[in-house]
Image (tube, rainbow, N blue to C red):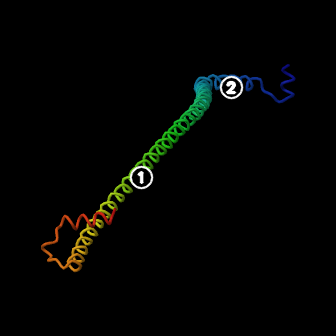
Amino acid sequence: MELLLEKLGIDWRLFLSQAVNFLILLVILRLTVYKPLLAILHKRQKTIEEGLEKAKEADKRLGEIGQLQKEKLKEAEGKAVVLIKNAEEKAKAEGQKLLADATRREQELVEKAKRRAEDEREEVLGKAKEEAVEIVKSILIKAVGVSPKAVDEALIRKVVGEKQS
């Protein structure tokens, strides 16, 4: 075997010293670099796994929040529909109330106008009677030739009353 190593150009002492150096270097690297590097890699892998778990949990929560949001929107839409219906009912009731008030006011105004017209008619009739009395008085004075003081007011009223009947 020694011959084979010589033919290949390998010095066994040098080879052995290099093997020992390699083992020493391997032990030193394993203690100083390899273990801390594995610890860092393991820690990094754990962090990545935790991040993935948190991402899954966040996706799950986001889905739940989306579902909750949909439910709240449906609930809000339901409340909005109820509020709109209530507002429409109140508006209808208010409209009916205003219509009733307007009708009542219209009737009051019509009644007031009728009373005013009746009062004016009575006033005009009263003035017409007074004028008729004066006319009859003047006619009697001229026709009979009686003095104005002698014409009895009761007589004039009786004549005017009979003519109007």
Residue 23 x, y percent position in the rendering: 67, 22
Q: Up-down: is 71 above or below 146?
A: above
Q: Is residue 165 above or below residue 148?
A: above
Q: How far across and how far down the image is residue 146, in percent? A: 16, 77
Nearer to me, 16 or 103? 103
3D distance between C-alphas at marks 2 and 1 = 111 Å
Query: Which of the two residues, 18 or 128, is positioned nearer the viewer here?
Result: 128
Q: Find numbered disc 2 in the image and state the secondary structure of the residue it sits on.
A: helix
Q: Residue 109 vs residue 73: left or right?
A: left
Which residue is tagged 1? Answer: 102
Question: Which amino acid, mark 2?
Answer: Phe
Q: Residue at x 22, y 68 (%)?
A: 156
Mark number displayed over residue 11: none
Q: Which mark is residue 22?
A: 2
Which badge, 2 or 1, is on the more N-terminal residue? Answer: 2
- Is 110 on the left or on the right of 49, as rendered? left
Q: Quadrant of the N terminus?
A: top right
State the residue lying farthest toward the left. Answer: 149
Image point 24% across, 64% down: which residue? 158
